[in-house]
Image (cartoon, rainbow, N blue to C red):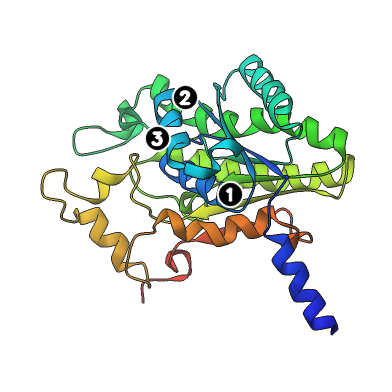
Amino acid sequence: MSDNATGLGKIAQAFDFSGRTVAITGGAGILGSAIACALAECGANVAILDVKLDAGQALLERTGKQAARAALFPVDVLQMESLREAASKVLERFGAADCLINAAGGNRPQATTGADTKFFDLPAEALRWVFDLNILGTILPCQVFGKIMAEKGGGVVLNISSMNAFRPLTRIPAYSAAKAGVSNFTQWLAVHMAQEYSPRIRVNAIAPGFFLTDQNRFLLQNRKTGELTERGKQILAHTPMGRFGNPEDLFGAVLWLLSPASEFVTGTIVPIDGGFSAYSGV
């Protein structure tokens, strides 16, 4: 067998997640659930961590024949005791926690500016909720599951950043600032884990562009007609590929960053945006 053939064989093996356990916070959300199903199909044990138990149960039913490798664990990503209890149950169920995906996050209408809501009037409570969910909701799970990886000497963390981290978008100040913080924290943690614990612990992030999710659907589409809003039209006009993303568009980058195929990649944020971040507008 040639060296090239051997190399290709290793690549094929890299995307076989059999025997590996991936914990996903916000795993019952639109993007998190799609990623969970993709990983289950690749043979992974999938621990779905979410406060939305009904949505989590529906996700388990969607996994079909892979359901035996998936389990739902109730968790509040802003409560350390809740995270520790969930991590303990994940270890009890699957015997390991090899990867962590931080997909918990979101915005709140009360923290969004508009024609009738000025920046100066945004309530501190709403701003704090958005910031805490996205920043602390990423940092705290890393403390809990990162410790497991540090004790084992290996593992992968994948955070979910956003286009907002590259260039802040209008109307959503707390979410934009929080996602910029997620990208910065991703780089910090990548260096910290490699230097202080093991170079076999990698930390990266993906930065999705514009996907139709529960969070932003009616900012991009008219609720009644389904037609594009002015904001939706502006986004597509600045997206060279001319469309919104589908959850499936995340799979390639996610599987690559979680797999040994990216074993020399850490501290990076990968845009998945149809070219939005590369386009200057002219």
Tell me the amino acid under the disc marked 3.
Asn
Q: Residue 189's image quarter?
A: top right
Drawn side of residue 94 relative to residue 114, left or right? right
Closer mark to the observer between disc 3 and disc 1: 1
Residue type pointed to by label 2: Arg
Extreme front residue here?
65
Query: Which quadrant is the N terminus positioned in?
Result: bottom right
Name the residue located 71 percent from the left edge and 21 percent from the top edge. Answer: 88
Give 83 or 20, whichever is nearer the viewer. 20
Distance from disc 2 to disc 3, alpha carbons, whole Å, reads 11 Å
x and y percentages locating residue 81 in the rendered image: 65, 14
Q: Give the number of the disc on residue 128.
A: 2
Given the current orientation, which residue lies at the most extreme left position?
225
Q: Earlier in the sequence, mark 2 or mark 3?
A: 3
Q: Label 3, label 1: how many angstroms apart (C-alpha)?
A: 26 Å
The residue located at (59%, 28%) in the rendering is 136
Query: Under tag 2, what secondary structure?
Result: helix
Q: Secondary structure at mark 3?
A: loop
Q: Is residue 124 above or below residue 96?
A: above
* Residue found at x 79% / y 31%: 148
Q: Which mark is drawn over residue 39?
A: 1
Callout 1 amino acid: Leu
x%, y% of residue 17? 68, 52
- Which badge, 3 or 1, comes first in the chain's sequence? 1
The picture quadrant where one finds residue 274 is bottom left
Question: Is disc 1 placed on a helix, strand or loop?
Answer: helix
Name the residue tied to disc 3.
Answer: 107
Report if the CB atoms under discs 1 and 2 are less than 8 Å apart.
no
Sort mark 3 into few (<14), some (14-19) or many (20+) by Cα contacts within 10 Å: many
